[in-house]
Image: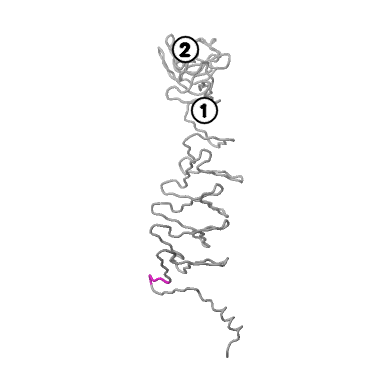
Amino acid sequence: MARSPDNRQAARKEIRMPGLEGKVTGANEIGVLGESDQGEGVRGVGRSGGHAGVVGANSAGGAGVFGESASGEGVRGVGRSNGHAAVVGANSAGGAGVFGESASGEGVRGVGRSNDHAAVVGTNSAGGAGVYGESASGEGVHGAGRSNTFAAVVGANSAGGPGVYGKSASGPAGYFDGDVRVTRNLIVNGDVQLVGADVAEQFEVQTVPGETAELLQPGSVVVLDEDGRVGTCGEPYDNRVAGIISGAGDRVPALVLDRTHDTTRERQPIAVVGKAWCLADATDDPIAVGDLLTTSTRPGHAMRAGDRLASIGAVVGKALTALPSGTGQVLVLVGLR
């Protein structure tokens, strides 16, 4: 019995024939081969919003789509939509959405030309990391910047957590090769370990830069003038004594207070607490360990404070090393009294 026109139309709808089909059963055989000397070997054009122009599917363990090139990209995706990527990798199981591997170059490289978007972005809607980097012998994550105003690596947290977190099993959690600027508070739960030996405070010196540089050398004992500036001592038992210029010998200041970057005035760090090497004069009176030291008539030098009454308010510190005679340096536990 002949089919009616309606039945023939329904039959055509039930038959879903592909435009091109290739099927092989042997190993290393090609189901579909497209080859061109000047154009695309295979081109797929789709006009459906829900389907791709070309689909590669593999029900076994091989790749769904494989691209290879001797000198160009193995696979290239070109997108013209602001809301969609040119290439998308999605994995509904536990594997990677996109995997990149290279023998000698970058496994994955992202190149961006927008001021508002990153070249590579990693986002995670769950509790995992947005971007994860691991290396067997180099940096896990390396950021290199060429801008004078932007950092090579930035950590920002819009919630209450830290912007940057560092942790190490045995070494330092963070290492900075250069100055560090903190615009707010620095909170330390453990100890603060400083390699220097004294706490110093910067003072303006009495002279213009370079006028008496040979006198204002590290280790010099200094006294205050009427304007609060410092200069080398020159009188015995001077109660204007302010401290010792820090930095002599193997001792450097651990902390410098009132530091400024004003280059129009000469300033020196004056040790007021801690240990510092000091110029000393033992010509008339030898200096022993434990002796109190005060100013002397020799510019910039300390001497033994033998007169206890005159020493009140004029002591710069206590000798930690001896100087039997002549002039030299002694290590001083700085403490004004």
Is residue 132 on the magenta stretch?
A: no
Q: Could you say which is closer to the camera, residue 92 or residue 88? A: 88
Q: Locate the C terminus by quadrant.
A: top right
State whether residue 128 is above or below residue 324: below
**Residue type, mark 1 in image:** Leu
Res 262 → quadrant: top right
Query: Which mark, residue 178?
Result: none
- Can I make out residue 270 in this image? no
User: Is the magenta region chiefly helix, strand or loop?
Assistant: loop
Judge by depth and name the residue closer to the eye, 249 or 142.
142
* Extreme residue toward the bottom, this view: 1
Position above or below: 167 against 34? above
Q: Nearer the viewer, residue 253 or 171?
A: 253
Is 28 covered by the magenta stretch? yes
Give x and y (percent) for residue 51: 55, 67
Q: Where is residue 76 in the image (x, y as percent from the top left)?
A: 47, 59
How packed mark 2 is, by other alpha carbons closer than 10 Å (few <14, some 14-19, many 20 or more), is: many
The one nearer the camera, 311 or 42, is 42
Q: Can residue 154 be seen in this view?
A: yes
Q: Identify residue type, mark 2.
A: Pro
Residue receiving disc 2 = 299
Residue 255: numbered disc: 1
Q: Give the range drawn in magenta.
A: 27-31
**CA gap, disc 2 and disc 1:** 26 Å
At a point 46% along the width and 45% down the height, the residue shown is 142
| Secondary structure under the numbered disc 2 in the rendered image | loop
Q: Earlier in the sequence, mark 2 or mark 1?
A: 1
